[in-house]
Amino acid sequence: MSPPPAALPDAGCAVEPVRTTVCVVGGGPAGAMLGLLLARAGIETVILERHHDFHRDFRGDTVHPATLQLLDELDLIDRFHALPHQKVTTIGVVQDGRRTDIADFTRLRVAYPYMAFVPQWDFLDLITAEGRRHPAHRLLMGTAAHGVLRSADGRVRGVRARGRAGDLEVHCTLVVAADGRHSTLREEVGARPRLLGRSLDVAFFRISRRPTDPDEGICVRVGPGRIFGATDRGHYWQMSYETTRGGLDAVRRAGLDAFRADLAALVPFLADRVHELRSLDELSVLEARIDRLDRWHRPGLLFIGDAAHAMSPVAGFGVNLAVQDAVATANALTAPLLHAQRTGARFDDALLAAVRRRRLLATVLSQGLQRGTQRFGIDTTVKKGRQPPAPRLFARCRPAQLLMSRIIGLGFRPEHVRTAPPRPPRPRGSHPEKGRA
Ligand SMILES: Cc1cc2nc3c(=O)[nH]c(=O)nc-3n(C[C@H](O)[C@H](O)[C@H](O)COP(=O)(O)OP(=O)(O)OC[C@H]3O[C@@H](n4cnc5c(N)ncnc54)[C@H](O)[C@@H]3O)c2cc1C
């Protein structure tokens, strides 16, 4: 894994209000991608990111075929492939010692038939570094938005934030809240998401990988009452333990040795190194929730990514859905924002509804799949101690595997970058990484 990038140099703070066309709050996958797309189209964009760098572990390091395609459309694919990464072509489930591939991306007729694992800070660094090549792009690291500014008619016209050098205001035509599932701006304007699922607890940890270990890609191992996920990250296994809400309390009560024994039983090739987990305190426990706003905008304010619809880790949809939201937003709003920027004309807030209209179906279906997996897969295993039936179905039915490969790899409504003149397409198969897993 490459080291985290140093804090970015253009962090700062201003006493005078910062004036811009768009203020994006949050420099995660949704915000970073939107910032790049808008700035590259010439829209003055300020991105506020409350952290000083992008270094956070277990944040979702999956880049799916649909996102790889977008990176290609942005001419970033070569630089992406130069980052340290692993390519994974299959997602498997092991039950009763037998592996079933529920997804096989090599079956997709796409340019990049694999899922790439990249530390998220490398991915975000790539996107924001590309953004900085455009004069309209400004990224303020270490700057947290804590409130909105409103005009007399109640329309949002900017944000209040705190940066390294103190408080600042950003005045703008449009605020985009891409500040994640605990969105401050959502809270600030009283937008309450509908809770759709909060029954999954996930704990992450690492175990070293040896060259003699099986070539597993991503594999979920299911046993009576237990689920472990193992993802090949080159020199280590990124392990996850999935359980229902509160299940980790039971793990803590049973103790470290019991947890190690479960791990050794379900992932036998790791039995000789379960001691690498020295304490249950090393488990990185993350709250997973699925929720969704009924309305994704207010006058002057748009929510995208997890701020509009929080995703659970199931199927690794979240990062890619967030990126797709950003692309859809840029596709829908670039022309009117440019017009407003150039002429000073009032931006028509009714246009903001187009983003939800475009992305709602894909979001609902993705969240539905996550909820179904939770209910019929995870709950069946953990609460009822039974084996989930779905993996056996995939073993018998190859079309089901193809369908799942499409859904996970491409999502329900893949977006394409439509905001800058398209460059001439490369002849199919001419890129050295294309079609190669
Ligand atoms: C345990 C767990 C594991 C997951 N694993 C995966 C996975 O493997 N693959 C996958 O695709 N998805 C995964 N997800 C889902 C994924 O993390 C999210 O769906 C995705 O990160 C959403 O991107 P985003 O840009 O909308 O929000 P985020 O990634 O949450 O980014 C929001 C950004 O806003 C910043 N921010 C927050 N508040 C403010 C503020 N007030 N001012 C300024 N900045 C602010 C944050 O620092 C952050 O950088 C996982 C989720 C969970 C809970």
Image: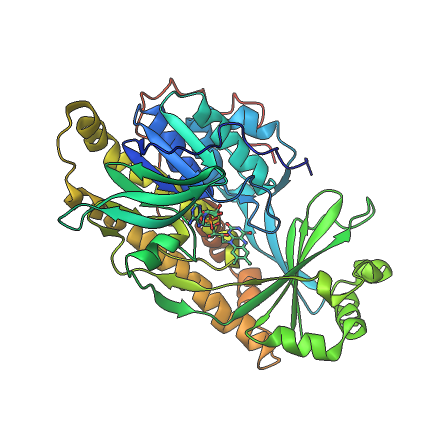
- Using the image as rendered, state which of residue 322 and residue 367 is in the foreground: 322
- Using the image as rendered, state which of residue 269 and residue 263 is in the foreground: 263
Quarter-of-image position of residue 220? bottom right
Residue under the image location 53 percent in, 69 percent down? 200
Answer whether residue 162 is visible to the viewer in this image: yes
x then y, percent, for residue 356: 26, 50
From the viewer's perspective, tell me whether residue 322 is left or right of residue 124. left
Quarter-of-image position of residue 242? bottom right
Tell how many labels.
0
Quadrant of the snapshot with the N terminus: top right
Residue under the image location 32 percent in, 37 percent down? 170
x then y, percent, for residue 86: 65, 39
The residue most toward the right is 272
The residue most toward the top is 424
Quadrant of the snapshot with the C terminus: top right
Q: Eyeballing the image, is 176 above or below 73?
A: below
x then y, percent, for residue 293: 31, 60
x then y, percent, for residue 269: 81, 58
- Using the image as rendered, state which of residue 421 and residue 275 is in the foreground: 275
Q: Eyeballing the image, is 59 above or below 4?
A: below
Answer whether residue 109 is visible to the viewer in this image: no
- Using the image as rendered, state which of residue 331 and residue 4 is in the foreground: 4
